[in-house]
Amino acid sequence: YGCELCDETGKTDGFGQLGYNGENFLEYDMNALTWKSLKQQADFMQDKWNSDTSRLVFWKIYFTQTCIECLTKQVVNGKSTLMRT
């Protein structure tokens, strides 16, 4: 999972994907506020995680706000570190 920030346009995006051994098993759909199983083995987790609606809202806020705020701080700190001579 993570988020992306474009310096030029200011466009942001977040994503949630969980995998194992190189294969994706679950992904978060922020528009539908649901986790989607990508493999039959993840159906149980999909059902369990989708039953907790407050947690589904939490993930949307995390991916679209909290993650972006943290990323922005890291970019600012990284630029100041790189600009040192």
Image (cartoon, grey):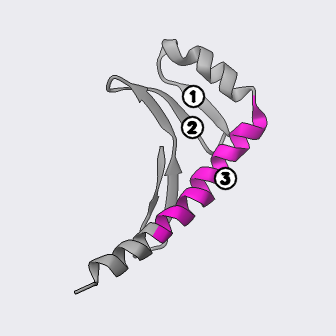
Report the amino acid beneath label 3.
Ile
Task: Please report contact status of discs 1 and 2: CB closer than 8 Å, yes or no.
Answer: yes
Q: Nearer the viewer, residue 32 or 18?
A: 18
State whether the magenta stretch is mostly helix, strand or loop: helix
Report the amino acid beneath label 1.
Lys
Quick check: 83 left or right of 56?
left
For marks 2 and 3, give the one nearer the viewer: 3
Question: Of all residues shown, which one is farthest toward the bottom?
Answer: 85
Residue 68 in the image: above or below residue 16:
below
Q: Which residue is mark 2?
A: 28
Q: Quadrant of residue 79?
A: bottom left
Quick check: 59 left or right of 53?
left
Q: Which residue is mark 3?
A: 61
Q: Which residue is mark 1?
A: 36
How much space separates mark 3 and mark 1, taking CA atoms?
A: 18 Å
Residue 81 in the image: above or below residue 1:
below
Report the amino acid beneath label 2.
Tyr
Q: Quadrant of the C terminus?
A: bottom left
Q: Is residue 42 magenta?
A: no
Label 1 packing within 10 angstroms: few (<14), some (14-19), many (20+): many
